[in-house]
Amino acid sequence: MDSIRPAASGRPVVPAAVPAAPTRPAAPGGSPATARPPAAVGPAVTPRPALTALRLSAFKAHRGAVLPLGPVTLFAGPSGSGKSSALQAYEALALLGAGGPLRSAFPDPAGCVPEGAVPDAQGRRGFRIGCTVDGPAGAVRLDLAVQAEPEPRIVGERLTDADGRTLLATALRDPRRRTVQAEWHTGDRSHVTRAPLPGDRLATALLPLRVAGSTEGQRRLLAAAEQVVLALRSVFACDPRPHRMRAPVPVGEGRLRRGCDNLAEVLHRTRADCTRRHARLVAAAAAGCAGPVRDLDVERLADGTVRALLDRGDRPSGSGGDPGGAARRPGTPLERLGDGELRYLALALVLLTGPGVLAVDQAAEVPGALQTLTVLADGFDRGLDRWQAGELLRLAAEICAEGHMRFVATAGEAVAEAARPGEGLTVVDLRRE
């Protein structure tokens, strides 16, 4: 078992097992379903870059927090413990890593400043976050100091390699300018290159456009920067909204959006594109939805829209019960399901698809075999019962063990308390003393 590490609150952070789900009651006329044992999950040996730690040095309610990240990670704790803000910091780093401006990553930068932070003599206040990315270049650290007031900008950035060498450092030299002074260390004759860079962009993401890679030092710098950028930008933030998933939707490109409101459209695509993964989705639906589930189907309506159906496997509507002599009764439209079942189905679909189906912009210039998609799910267990949460976590453990996907989510105390240490899932307990 991995060693115990302190969380932000001082409580231990331990790798934990998927919660043991109780036996689900039998549907009327059916047999009881039994809980499957959790999948055996070990560390995936792959060259894919991935975040292994999130640092919230001074961010909202967090101070000096180092949160470990595994293939499947839950930030757990009561309301107000900082679960959602930790996920917000992760998503903000992802947006910056993709080349986005600071304002898109932090729409309300002043709200990210720790409570009680006192402005300096120039009226400036800010926050600090960072991460560690493991991969072929080793454990590379990225640390950011962000000024929130009076004007948002990244006033300090540091990229450090696995040996502790500073590869990139930026600093605000003149508050009147919109740029910062950047220095990157390449190890060639000049040793250090200096140039102004925009103060509202991640300098690490700009380095591949500035460094030729003609010397060993430049290649070392590029390897570290590209590893961080690749891990950060491959993120899909998911927050299924059941009230938006009930209406029929037009058929489009078939890429699942953040709120999963186009679930029926994506099912229309995936049902035909990948029968194996569709079969796994049907099995997940049967495990997490009330009543029998034979299939997940899609019905095209007269106006050209589609809606999703649960095929309950009903007996034919014709007399005599001859399966070949009559059409089956229509399935149950998904809009009739409860919020918890709709969220469950949406999260299962996210885990069983990938970047080609999810609305995420991955690095086109990097082979898919070298990329890892990270799914962020705030309020993962919202509306789910204990059985459904356990089924989804087992599915996540199974999928993430393959190495091409990681799952980071927030959950309430009940999920954390049901987890057992030692079998693959990392639970970061954010309860305060």
Image (cartoon, rainbow, N blue to C red):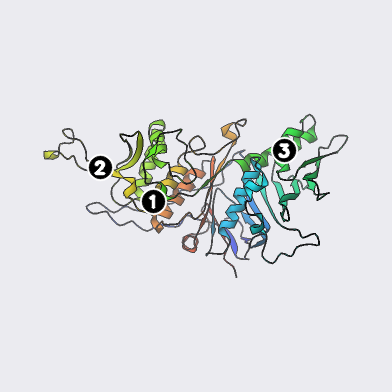
| Viewer-nearest of discs 2 and 1 | 2
Q: Which mark is residue 206?
A: 3
The CA distance from mark 2 to mark 3 is 55 Å
Count neighbours of disc 2 (C-alpha within 10 A) and say few if under 14, some if 14 to 19, many if 20 or more: some
Residue at the (46%, 51%) spot, across then down: 393
Q: Which mark is residue 313?
A: 2
Tell me which label, 2 or 3, sits earlier in the chain: 3
Q: The N terminus appears in which quarter of the rendering?
A: bottom right
Residue at the (70%, 43%) spot, across then down: 202
Give the structural element (helix, strand or loop) at label 1. loop
Residue 166 visible in the snapshot? no
Residue 314 visible in the snapshot? yes
The CA distance from mark 3 to mark 1 is 47 Å
Decide if residue 166 is on the left or right side of residue 393: right
| Viewer-nearest of discs 2 and 3 | 3
Tell me which label, 2 or 1, sits earlier in the chain: 1
Question: Dot 1 corresponds to which residue?
Answer: 36
The residue type indicated by label 2 comes to: Gly
Q: Quadrant of residue 225?
A: top right
Q: Nearer the viewer, residue 312 or 249?
A: 249
Count neighbours of disc 1 (C-alpha within 10 A) and say few if under 14, some if 14 to 19, many if 20 or more: some
Residue at the (77%, 60%) spot, across then down: 123
The residue type indicated by label 1 comes to: Arg
Q: Position of residue 286 (x, y in %)?
A: 33, 47
Q: Position of residue 344 (x, y in %)?
A: 41, 50
Give the structural element (helix, strand or loop) at label 2. loop
Tell me which label, 3 or 1, sits earlier in the chain: 1
The residue type indicated by label 3 comes to: Leu
Please, which residue is most extreme toward the right here?
A: 189
Q: The C terminus appears in which quarter of the rendering?
A: bottom right
Q: Position of residue 220 (x, y in %)?
A: 75, 37
Q: Nearer the viewer, residue 64 or 269?
A: 269
